[in-house]
Amino acid sequence: MDFSFNEDQRAIQDMARSFAEKEFAPHAEVWDQDHIFPEEALRKAAALGLAGIYAREDVGGSALTRLDAAIVFEELSKGCTSTSAYLSIHNMATWMIDHFGDDALRQKYCPSLTSMDYFASYCLTEPGAGSDAASLTTRAVRDGDDYIINGAKAFISGGGRSEIYVVMVRTGGAGPKGISAIVVEKGTKGLSFGAQEKKMGWHSQPTCTVNFEDCRVPTSNLVGAEGEGFKIAMKGLDGGRLNIGACSLGAAQACLDLTVQYMSERKQFGKKLNEFQALKFRIADMATELEAARLLLHKAASKVDAKAPDASHFAAMAKRLATDTGFNIVNETLQLHGGYGYMQDYPIERYLRDVRVHQILEGTNEIMRLIISRKILET
């Protein structure tokens, strides 16, 4: 057991931190207020290899590990949590095509995804199929060398803007074994988009419903084999859960650092806030909880990298703990800022709005508890 980063990981961390401080943090407030999708900044991230973190090198990927990715996303999230979360989703979609697609499909799409000439979206959730993802009803029917897709996907990050949609569709019977994954390009006849959602946070990324009406897609766009879609989706979510947990930790660390600084300056009752023992203890508890969540996340990332049989179990535990801990710490730091924390003049309230959804997406934390308990109890 080695709890220290190696030289390469320290370099990756420094790179991600420097990039976030220069390219994300100075603009995050405006992106949030004006609902700007920062394409230029994302393409700068891609130029550093951050749009294909664990995609293979022959298609422009960085071929890094899940632990490397967790380090990256924690640092990026300190700069802009919303934009970092979209980048995580883009990486997940890119990895699915790279890892499960045949070589023709990989070469067709992945070079443009790793450079972010194309943006990607992941389409699993439906209006009637959220936590019960295996009940999805979007159907793809074989017609010669094509599939004809009908249905709708909900809450799709990048919806309407992305060029590439990795879509989970039903090609067979009921249940998970009837689900397949297929790539749909923007501009395909029958593909349309709903109005942009009005969200509490994540304002720097577009989100909408994606509709399919007799949408004809070549069978060569199938990712993996028919019936493998649910397995592909769950494998992708193992990594997505780690990344979104890392984004929560980054936001929490940023808010904790801001609060430590604020408490050294703010005075009440004739003393600086950092001189009150009760407030010192709250800082101590937050730092301890943050470190514990980070350690579990890094252990889970190592499990996913090693393809351990209990990797999904640990990914669920890490996601549950990191996103709950992250939100609780951000909320606590807002409290310690008092009324100022509630004002948009300070970034705490933006971090709070952005991290709240992390307890819902990539599998709700209630579903994480179901996965964890099912493994322990073998039910």
Image (cartoon, grey):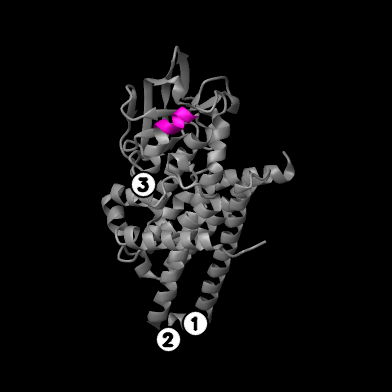
Q: Which residue is found at the position 34% from the left and 26% from the top?
A: 191
Q: Secondary structure at mark 3?
A: loop
Above or below, comparing residue 126 to residue 274 in the picture: above
Query: How far apart are the alpha carbons under marks 3 and 1?
Result: 37 Å
Quadrant location of the C terminus in the rendered image: top right
Residue hosting label 3: 199
Q: Amino acid at mark 3?
A: Lys
Q: Position of residue 18 (x, y in %)?
A: 39, 63
Label 2: how many Cα within 10 Å (few below 14, some 14–19, many 20+):
few
Q: Is residue 151 left or right of residue 67?
A: left
Q: Is residue 210 visible?
A: yes
Q: Amino acid at mark 2?
A: Lys
Magenta part, dominant SS:
helix
Label 2 with label 1: CB-CB less than 8 Å: yes
Q: Which residue is mark 1?
A: 276
Residue farthest to the front, as pictured: 58
- The residue that mark 2 highlights is 271
Marks 2/3: CA–CA distance: 40 Å
